[in-house]
Amino acid sequence: MKLDGRRERFRSLHEEGTFLMPNPHDVGTCRLLTTLGFSALATTSGGHSASLGRMDMTAHRAGVVEHVSALATSTDLPLSVDAEQCYPEEAGGVQETVRLLAEAGASGCSIEDWNSRTGRIEDLGQAVERVGAAAAEADRQGMVLTARAENHLRGVNNLDDTVLRLASYREAGAHVVYAPGLPDLDAIERVVKDTNAPVNVLLQPGGPSVGELTRVGVRRLSVGSALARVAYGAVVQAAVALLATGTLEEAWPYLDRELSSRAFAAE
């Protein structure tokens, strides 16, 4: 599918119901997930950083753009980008970041209000200004902009402030809103009702089911860095067992789940 078609498809997905958008962390997982029947994919800053042996939110913009370009050429599905704060301190600011991601093949991207440099949530006014700038460029590129309120991931359990922020981001032009880590289904339902926007929810172990989230009107579901953490956790467990026993059979008891190298081949 051509890029314009992917972007049009991504926009329309948010109007059709609830869809699941998993998060590949490298080209291999991108190709694998593409073959499994999902409608769209999204990058994960945590998973990408882990694939480089780095802590989350330490990548530079140029590296993220290169990563997006590699993934976008490995799939014909719409690809949304976890762009952290859209790198407001780099040349051209958030608008240039959105433009570069569009050029790399993204169908959408996100912008969040957590400042990793200062270790705090940005003031609402500044966050709204940046969302507006990113949304304007996303509109020019035909992309979907997701605005994120990071309160609940950062220990600020203030649902009123989260709803205010998301509603403000929507008014500033965001196409989708997202507050990862919302505490329960009631909080999620309030976000859906009070923001008047398509809502993305982060699936979590023990959290609401896909059916429950669909029932309260959530449009999009993602998993963040979960798949990357599962993959790297399996590597560590297998390697520890290998070191202890010296046998592959003991190190990896799930050989029947092993993937052939053909699974990673390009179409």
Image (cartoon, grey):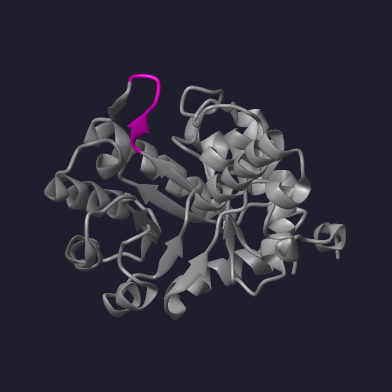
- The answer to whether residue 58 is above or below residue 168 is above
Over which residues does the magenta segment extend? 113-118
Residue ranking furthest to the front: 245
Q: Residue placed at 67% from the left, 56% from the top?
A: 253
Q: Which quarter of the rendering shows the C terminus?
A: bottom right
Q: Could you say where residue 45 lies in the image, as x and y percent from the top left?
A: 53, 40
Q: Nearer the viewer, residue 196 or 236?
A: 236
Q: Can residue 12 be seen here? A: yes
Horizontal relation, residue 20 to residue 28: left or right = left
Q: Could you say where residue 29 lies in the image, as x and y percent from the top left?
A: 69, 54
Q: Quadrant of residue 90?
A: top right
Q: Magenta stretch containing residue 115, yes or no?
A: yes
Q: Magenta stretch containing residue 20, yes or no?
A: no
Which secondary structure class fits the magenta region best? Answer: loop
Q: Can residue 104 be seen here? A: no
Q: Nearer the viewer, residue 99 or 181?
A: 181
Q: Nearer the viewer, residue 247 or 113?
A: 247
Q: Quadrant of residue 207?
A: bottom left
Horizontal relation, residue 95 to residue 107: left or right = left
Q: Residue placed at 26% from the left, 75% from the top?
A: 216
- The answer to whether residue 28 is above or below residue 17 is above
Q: Could you say where residue 65 lies in the image, as x and y percent from the top left?
A: 66, 38
Q: Which quarter of the rendering shows the N terminus?
A: bottom right
Q: Residue placed at 19% from the left, 38% from the top?
A: 156
Horizontal relation, residue 12 to residue 122: left or right = right
Residue ranking furthest to the top: 118
